[in-house]
Image (cartoon, rainbow, N blue to C red):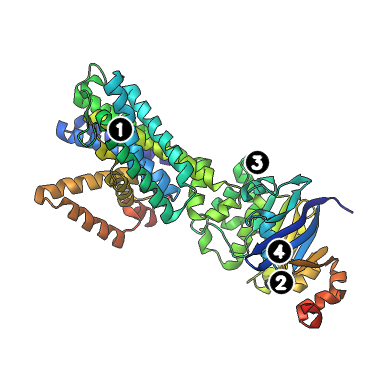
């Protein structure tokens, strides 16, 4: 109960922030929330199930194009397009999982990375349809919800996506499946000898994760008006991992925290220097050295054990 | 005689040139405590690995309650009622004792908490339910391992050297616990402690070089000259 109340309180604070912040900051927050959906999904696979994937850019890009192509070519309205993007992410994750989950550890990282690279090259190959590196410009976000200003519509949709993602991820990790996912992460052989099929558990986690990534990709493309092949590059596989590591792998709110922290770190660094990635790199080294469990993971270890 | 619950015919597993398990026929009777003994390297752990599905079968067949389970993967055999407790303690060290056992309770067995607490009481760990499993003493971790096996409510419980590393006082309590499991559960016990084996088991199977050397009651096994030779060494053992 306490846990649900805490999460609803976080969502309430986010809602208020979106409403009262000036437009520039509210838009930043909407961006963070959308990307945090991606991180939250990544966390289900990596943080809770122990699946270190380097191919999540593929699921994100599947969401981007799953939504962008029908909107661009068939004139589908944006809201159902988000649903399509979500399904595209989950479907592709199922397909990749069926093959990649025959491996584990480093091999799994490499196989997922290869799939994502293949996806990226495919997007470039069909550049006339996908726009390739130049991408496609999406219709104005004003069209998303009639009667609202673009900024408000964006805030509402980003908030809704994140709220659903956060509560769903909390529900999953508190369910039986969630406990078995953690069991697989902690001791796969033991879990197998308790009657759990490692393959189906890990596949379920990966598909869930892909659904989240797809929803985030679709939301990102539609809210910020751009779909491009660059979303399938390795960078978009590494980013969710960094966000999750920074916020705390295996904590429900860690992905949001990590996404926000990284966003403002890059934003702040950009005011001082053009070498923003250097600042990010130093921050990560410090994090791994002094708080390898991330922000929330460290807080949990220091006494707040109830944090899920 | 009682009915056979678990049966193996011609069970074989070779690792390269090593015949770890070599054409073993074996019957486990419902409700008995059956001990599996043999010198180091005799193939005991490989043999129960074949029974539990951890090691793939090369030849031969396994039936549980008359049903052929040879092709089933390990997790499916667990669901059918074969539980295996590890020789080297394998619990979830970062989870609580309660959560460790909760993971073992089958999904269809109704309310979780009573089932978990029942298993914990059985092994005497009920008052440590909230402790993190990794912080338990070694003996308690072995009990937790057994508690997880019990929570599965298995038809056959395979215990792989359960008393290894336990103090002698703990062994006595452990023996009483195992005895209390039958006849609801059938127990297959790999054990090096001969005193315990002779005390607990109704029947004993002796493996040597991957083959069954003898099967019988403790008295028969004790009197068997081939067994004595295998254990003590001597000319007969090499033959």
The residues bearing labels 4 and 3 have C-alpha atoms spaced at a distance of 36 Å
Label 3: state its secondary structure: loop
The residues bearing labels 1 and 2 have C-alpha atoms spaced at a distance of 61 Å
Q: Nearer the viewer, mark 1 or mark 2?
A: 1
Residue A252 picture location, percent across and down: 38, 44
Evaluate if marks 3 and 1 touch, with contact meaning CB atoms under 8 Å apart: no
Residue that carries the numbered disc 4 in the rendered image: B21
Mark 3 falls within which chain? B
**Mark number displayed over residue A64:** 1
The residues bearing labels 3 and 1 have C-alpha atoms spaced at a distance of 43 Å
Q: Are marks 2 and 3 on the same chain?
A: yes
In the rendered structure, the answer to whether residue B19 lies left or right of residue B225 reads left
Residue A304 picture location, percent across and down: 39, 52
Q: Are marks 3 and 1 on the same chain?
A: no
Residue B233 picture location, percent across and down: 76, 81
In the picture, residue B124 is in which quadrant? Answer: bottom right
Q: Earlier in the sequence, mark 2 or mark 3?
A: 3
**Mark number displayed over residue B11:** none
Give whichever of A21, B81 is nearer the camera: B81
In the picture, residue A219 is in which quadrant? Answer: top left
Q: Residue furthest right?
A: B1
* Picture layout, residue A94 above or below residue A69: below
Residue that carries the numbered disc 2 in the rendered image: B192
- Residue density around tag 2, few if under 14, some if 14–19, many if 20 or more, within 10 Å: some
Evaluate if marks 1 and 4 touch, with contact meaning CB atoms under 8 Å apart: no
Q: Are marks 1 and 2 on the same chain?
A: no
Label 2: state its secondary structure: loop
Label 1: state its secondary structure: helix
* Picture layout, residue B238 above or below residue A123: below
Mark 4 falls within which chain? B
- Residue density around tag 4, few if under 14, some if 14–19, many if 20 or more, within 10 Å: many
């Amino acid at each position: 109960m306490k846990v649900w109340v805490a999460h609803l309180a976080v969502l309430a604070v986010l809602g208020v922030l979106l409403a009262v912040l000036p437009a520039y900051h509210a838009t930043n927050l909407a961006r963070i929330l959308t990307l945090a959906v991606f991180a939250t999904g990544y966390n289900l696979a990596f943080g809770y199930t122990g699946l270190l994937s380097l191919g999540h850019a593929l699921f994100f890009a599947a969401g981007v194009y799953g939504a962008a192509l029908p909107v661009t070519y068939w004139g589908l309205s944006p809201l159902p397009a988000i649903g399509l993007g979500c399904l595209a992410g989950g479907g592709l994750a199922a397909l990749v999982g069926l093959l990649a989950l025959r491996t584990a550890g480093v091999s799994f990282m490499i196989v997922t990375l290869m799939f994502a690279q293949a996806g990226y090259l495919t997007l470039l190959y069909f550049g006339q349809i996908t726009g390739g590196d130049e991408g496609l410009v999406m219709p104005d976000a004003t069209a998303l919800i009639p009667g609202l200003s673009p900024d408000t519509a964006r805030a509402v949709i980003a908030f809704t996506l994140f709220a659903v993602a956060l509560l769903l991820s909390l529900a999953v990790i508190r369910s039986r499946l969630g406990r078995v996912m953690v069991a697989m992460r902690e001791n796969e052989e033991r879990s197998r000898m308790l009657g759990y099929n490692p393959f189906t558990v890990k596949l379920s986690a990966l598909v869930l994760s892909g659904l989240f990534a797809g929803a985030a990709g679709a939301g990102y493309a539609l809210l910020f008006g751009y779909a491009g092949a660059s979303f399938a590059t390795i960078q978009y596989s590494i980013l969710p991992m960094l966000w999750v590591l920074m916020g705390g792998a295996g904590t429900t709110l860690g992905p949001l925290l990590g996404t926000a922290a990284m966003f403002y770190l890059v934003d702040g660094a950009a005011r001082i220097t053009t070498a923003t990635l250097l600042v990010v790199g130093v921050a990560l080294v410090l994090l791994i050295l002094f708080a390898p469990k991330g922000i929330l993971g460290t807080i949990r270890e220091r006494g707040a054990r109830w944090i899920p | 005689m009682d009915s056979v619950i678990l049966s193996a015919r011609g069970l074989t597993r070779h690792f390269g040139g090593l015949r770890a398990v070599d054409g073993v026929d074996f019957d486990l009777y419902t409700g008995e405590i059956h001990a599996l003994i043999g010198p180091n390297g005799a193939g005991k752990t490989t043999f129960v690995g074949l029974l539990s599905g951890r090691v793939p079968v090369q030849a031969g067949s396994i039936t549980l309650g008359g049903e052929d389970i040879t092709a089933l993967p390990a997790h499916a055999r667990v669901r059918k009622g074969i539980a295996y407790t590890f020789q080297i303690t394998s619990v979830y060290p970062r989870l609580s004792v309660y959560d460790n056992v909760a993971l073992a309770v089958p999904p269809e067995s109704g309310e979780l908490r009573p089932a978990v607490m029942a298993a914990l009481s059985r092994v005497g760990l009920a008052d440590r339910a909230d402790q993190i499993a990794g912080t338990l003493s070694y003996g308690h971790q072995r009990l937790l391992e057994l508690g997880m096996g019990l929570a599965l409510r298995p038809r056959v419980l395979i215990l792989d050297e359960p008393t290894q590393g336990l103090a002698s006082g703990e062994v006595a309590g452990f023996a009483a616990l195992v005895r209390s499991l039958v006849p609801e559960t059938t127990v297959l016990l790999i054990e090096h402690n001969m005193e315990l084996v002779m005390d607990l088991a109704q029947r004993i199977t002796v493996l040597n070089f991957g083959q069954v050397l003898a099967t019988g009651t403790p008295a028969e096994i004790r009197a068997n000259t081939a067994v004595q030779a295998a254990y003590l060494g001597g000319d007969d053992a090499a033959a």
